[in-house]
Amino acid sequence: MKQFSYVRVTSSASAIAAISKDKTAMFLAGGTNLVDLMKSGVTSPDRLVDITRLPMADIALTKTGIRIGALAKNTAVAEHAEVIKHFPLLSQALKAGASPQLRNMATVGGNMMQRTRCHYFYDTAMPCNKRQPGSGCGAIGGFNRMHAIFGASEQCIAVHPSDMCVALTALDAVVTVQGPKGERKIPFGDFHRLPGTTPEIDNTLQRGELIMAVDIPYQQELTKTHYLKVRDRASYAFALVSVGAALSVSSNNITDVRLAMGGVAHKPWRLKEAEAFLKGKPATEDNFREAARLTMASAKSQGANEFKLTLAPNSIVEALKLAVANGNN
Ligand SMILES: Cc1cc2nc3c(=O)[nH]c(=O)nc-3n(C[C@H](O)[C@H](O)[C@H](O)COP(=O)(O)OP(=O)(O)OC[C@H]3O[C@@H](n4cnc5c(N)ncnc54)[C@H](O)[C@@H]3O)c2cc1C
């Protein structure tokens, strides 16, 4: 591993100042992704700015919803009574991720910023436009069973690996960030981006900006929720396909619905078309199938991930059925 300097900061202002001094400096939170990337030579910062002592781990109800600090641990969020009560989809998604040990270390900000799990990104002997722009994409025509079926480009077909972010996308969360130019808010759906011709850029965070918190608005009626994660092992594995579903159902009619998928695109994939179709319709399997069919219209296989073209619509239908059956009321 390349040598680096280390500084621990005690205020967000000093964190932002410290990172601005050095082009390659990076924030260190739980370290569960960044340290792995450093060990394998994928990321080589000259300076680590340890933010773990900043007072940004609170989880508290607000007038309009809940505010979760960027340093709140994944376990603390998943097991928080108000999260379980008001935002069960978020708790379910977090519990489906990684392992208990990792969730005890991993933070909300770090989870949002985690890099893809594409094998070619991690293997520095292979071409990867995300790791080294212009070097090519080993996954196109290569080993790509984990890869994207939506929104991929000729430069990159990697997927975003987070479970938590699927729930936050479905729940219309908003990210608060602070940087050298002050504070700004980013709707969660705009935080991550598609690869296009610049796959090295995962998200819309600007250089020097620090994620402070995530706000989720109350959606009292969305009581029927399910996070379905299909993976190679029952635990400690990234999603091949995941679906976060949250519904409001009255007399078997869907009055509101939120749907997002993981493991299928460079960003958490919101199913707006399916949501629009389902709203106002009876909660029947036929309608769930049609919603899935509409979603899949823009899907494209890369070869070895052809099975996702069947797995994804089946997962949408299954998640909706389980949400309606197992919801809170
Ligand atoms: C074996 C293994 C299995 C896993 N399985 C899953 C899984 O199934 N599902 C899943 O969702 N995740 C999974 N993960 C990923 C895990 O959730 C992430 O590693 C973790 O969430 C990252 O959080 P962290 O606090 O450790 O971030 P770090 O590793 O400290 O940082 C990651 C990145 O975030 C940046 N960063 C951190 N905090 C901030 C901030 N406040 N503002 C701006 N930038 C910031 C850092 O600079 C760095 O670039 C797995 C990880 C491992 C190692």
Image (spheres, rainbow, N blue to C red):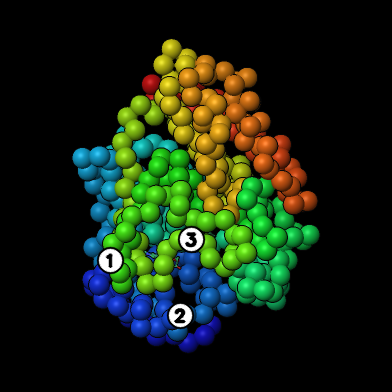
Are the residues flagged by discs 1 and 2 in contact, CB closer than 8 Å? no
Q: In the figure, 140 relative to 167: above or below?
A: below
Q: Position of residue 49 (x, y in %)?
A: 36, 76
Q: In the figure, 135 relative to 227: above or below?
A: below
Residue 123 visible somewhere in the drawing: no
* SS at circle 2: loop
In the figure, residue 15 lies in which quadrant?
bottom left
Residue 110 visible somewhere in the drawing: yes
Instruction: Kindly identify the amino acid type of the residue bearing the numbered disc 1.
Output: Gly
Q: Residue at x 28, y 44 (%)?
A: 66
Instruction: Kindly identify the amino acid type of the residue bearing the numbered disc 2.
Output: Thr
Look at mark 3 in the image and give the residue it sits on. 203
Q: Choose the circle earlier in sequence order: 1 or 2.
A: 2
Q: Nearer the viewer, residue 101 or 189?
A: 189
Q: In the figure, 50 relative to 242: above or below?
A: below
Distance Cα–Cα, label 1 vs label 2: 21 Å
Look at mark 1 in the image and give the residue it sits on. 182
Q: Choose the circle earlier in sequence order: 3 or 2.
A: 2
Q: Residue at x 33, y 51 (%)?
A: 214
Mark 1, Cα crowd under 10 Å, few <14 / some 14-19 / many 20+, is few
* SS at circle 1: strand
Distance Cα–Cα, label 3 vs label 2: 17 Å
